[in-house]
Amino acid sequence: MEDLAVTLARAQFAFTMSFHIIFPAFSIGVASYLLVLEGLWLKTGKDEYLSLFKYWRKIFAVAFGMGVVSGIVMSYQFGTNWSVFSDKTGPVIGPLMAYEVLTAFFLEAGFLGVMLFGMGRVSKRLHFLATFMVALGTLISATWILAANSWMHTPAGYSINEVGQFIPENWMEIIFNPSFPYRLVHMVLAAFLTTAFVVGAVGAWHLLKDKNTATARKMFSMAMWMAAIIAPIQILAGDLHGINTLEYQPAKVMAMEGHYESHPHGAPLYLFGIPDDKAQELKFAIGIPNASSLILKHHLHAPLDGLDTIKAEDRPPVVILFWSFRIMVGIGMMMLCVGIISVFLRWRKKLYDSPLFHKFALIMGPSGFVAVLAGWITTEVGRQPYTVYGILRTSQSIGPVEAPAVGASLIAFVIVYFALFGAGTYYILKMMGQSPEDLGPLTESPVRIASPHLLEGENND
Amino acid sequence: MIDLSTIWAGLLALSIFIYVILDGFDLGIGVIFPFLDNDDDRAIAMNSVAPVWDGNETWLILGGGGLFAAFPLAYAIIMPALYAPFIAMILALVFRGVAFEYRWRDKRHEKTWDRAFHFGSFVATFMQGIVLGAFIQGIEVEGRAYAGGWWDWASPFTFTCGLALTAGYALLGSTWLIMKTENGLRDRAYAIAKNTGRATLLFIGIVSIWTPFLSPKIAAQWLSFPHIFFVLPVPILTLVLAAITAWGLTKRKDNVPFLATIGLFGLCFAGLGIGVTPYIVPHVITIQQAAAPDVSLSFMLVGALIFLPLILGYTAYSYWVFRGKIDPKAGYH
């Protein structure tokens, strides 16, 4: 019974977390995009920026709502299923999350009302401030939660008391734990890239319908600049993150790389293979000799240990990591391709006249979400079999819950999430299908009622 | 006596109270949603809380997150003990939360999302009442963990508390609508407030009389010195505020019933507080026992002292931007 409860609780956490991360990954990027759009509108006075702002604001409202409600689940799930973990790590992780609520969640939610419904009720300057606060809130939120998450990977600045609780010793060491800066940069860039590819796909869709749509051209162009600039930076950031992981969580990197065996004279970079945990070998491996040593150690013949140096009970599951890592990297490379092609087409003045490229950008629309999920699966599954790496095992983190209770709630979450967030995704896609040009007049007279659908039409006042 | 853990218990109690009031009225609007006259009124009612509900619900996250951070042991005991009500509450909040946006995006399924809004609000409220009831009723603890079964929370008392909170939130919601609307919708809200007001008062009576029988320790605490001096004024003030609410409802003073209702909630909260302090898991684990170490509490206190006033400031500002009556004409698009 005990083991089943752990498995189910892990499944529940993975499921609710995977759903949840999609919304912040998107809303971090869209909030910043909205800030840029409103800023450009205030600076240039061009209507196309205001149209785009209102267009993406509607989509943001739906995504943000889904993020809030799926986030509440997370803040209670620590206690319902993982109460031993909560009791032990609460003194360290709890304050980080409390700071997230105090400095970020309230900021976002407090100014969201003004941003969504306050145009015309407050001055343009104040409205812009509200948009800024929402965008700032999303970034502050990411900072705290990634500090907490990173601490679970690379715990620092703590001691352990007589009842087994982690006690903070040095807050700076806790917050700025060794993997935090890398994880933060990697995740925020991922959020920006994810949004850029969604915006790019929406732009491409409307360009495919009519390549002369001004707003579609504008958003496609902005998104492609982001892809061209951020994708290479992200690849570099990911590489540095990987090197950091090698230092603090070598077993995770061994699993990602498929290195069952040690390579004292330089390790190959396996591009493909079928990991076999039973045989402890990578079957049908195709690799580039010594390339892994070059990437991770910046030296062709640097020795790299394999999973054979790790005790069996301390190894993460290789199959999941091997593939999730390859999916993430593969998508990253394709994003880089989009960025490079876009620069080339822009240079040839063909950015808006290349239906084939627009189709490619359209297909790449959801790629950021897949990459974010694959990346998180890589890092979190790679943390196994621990919740606090090297110290607190997952099997010792669970609370006094019984498998039927966890199983029943898991089923409830699955049904409710698929139904409700499925509907939400459908509505978002429907809104994306509409052209920003069809939003109606952009009058800015006072709006007397706070409802998104009324903002789109004309006012009575 | 006044140490960091006591300060944090106070801050947490304050957050939970603010949550109860703020989300109370917007959940309450969901509870009375089907009893409004027509779709236009329902649209106005929902619009009256649309700009603020995210912020209101954030206080719940602070409640949960704050408990986790400041009193990890209490969090680790209470959550498993109330597993089913918490999961049901969370799922219900998901339903009603998405309805705010979905309702406007899909005219064909407007009724579906209205139902999601109503039942989500009702179930979330009812479960919060059950949590409150189970908290009073007591939680079985062994060592550092919950030791009871996963249906222990279910009892006639907790279900009564569920109904009581439903009546209370419905009163908050209807008096909020009285304050924010005009004409037919306001008339309807007045009628609903009179009924929910009577129900709320009745339930306050029932729960107040039942509690000391159920928990002799709370009774003893209520009657002991010096608590009794704080306890005695509570029923008297409750009757005074109930009279003010009734007066506001009969004389149609639009702002009075909502404010008086907040007072009623405050008194109930105070009565409970006097009955359970210094325990955080009533009569098993004290505030001090459950508290995180001072180094955690002081680190957070710095943040709370800086940010809570700011939060209250810009929350008040947001309410001020959307102040006054909602123009009902704007609802007829």
Image (cartoon, rainbow, N blue to C red):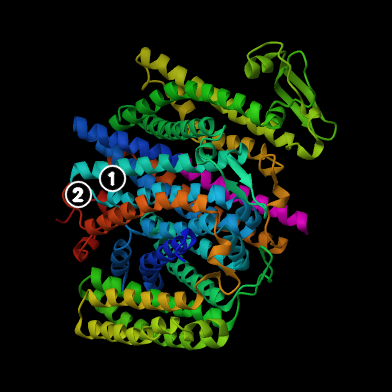
Q: Quadrant of the N terminus of chain A?
A: bottom right
Q: Position of residue A185 (x, y in %)?
A: 48, 31
Nearer to the camera, A228 or A221:
A228
Q: Main secondary structure of the magenta part?
A: helix
Most extreme residue toward the left is A461
Residue of label 2: A122
Residue of label 1: A130
Hey, what amino acid is under mark 1? Ala
Please provide the residue range marked out in magenta.
A1-25
Callout 2 crowding tier (Cα within 10 Å): few <14, some 14–19, many ≥20: some
* Mark 1: secondary structure: helix
Name the quadrant containing residue B68. Answer: bottom right
Q: Quadrant of the C terminus of chain A?
A: bottom left
Residue A11 in the magenta stretch? The answer is: yes
User: Is residue B36 something one can see in this rendering?
Assistant: no
Instruction: Give the vertical position of A440 relative to A225 (above or below).
Output: below
Q: Residue at x 53, y 40 (%)?
A: A170
Q: Are marks 1 and 2 on the same chain?
A: yes
Q: Residue at x 54, y 53 (%)?
A: A74
Name the quadrant containing residue A253. Answer: top right
Question: Is residue A96 left or right of A251 when viewed as pictured?
Answer: left
Q: Residue at x 78, y 16 (%)?
A: A264
Q: Are marks 1 and 2 in contact (CB under 8 Å)?
A: yes
Instruction: Give the vertical position of A66 relative to A363 (above or below).
Output: below
Nearer to the camera, B273 or A46:
B273
Instruction: Give the vertical position of B99 relative to B222 (above or below).
Output: above
User: Which sits earlier in the primary sequence, circle 1 or circle 2?
Assistant: 2
Q: Position of residue B7 (x, y in %)?
A: 44, 61
Q: Which mark is residue B22?
A: none
User: Is residue B276 something one can see in this rendering?
Assistant: yes
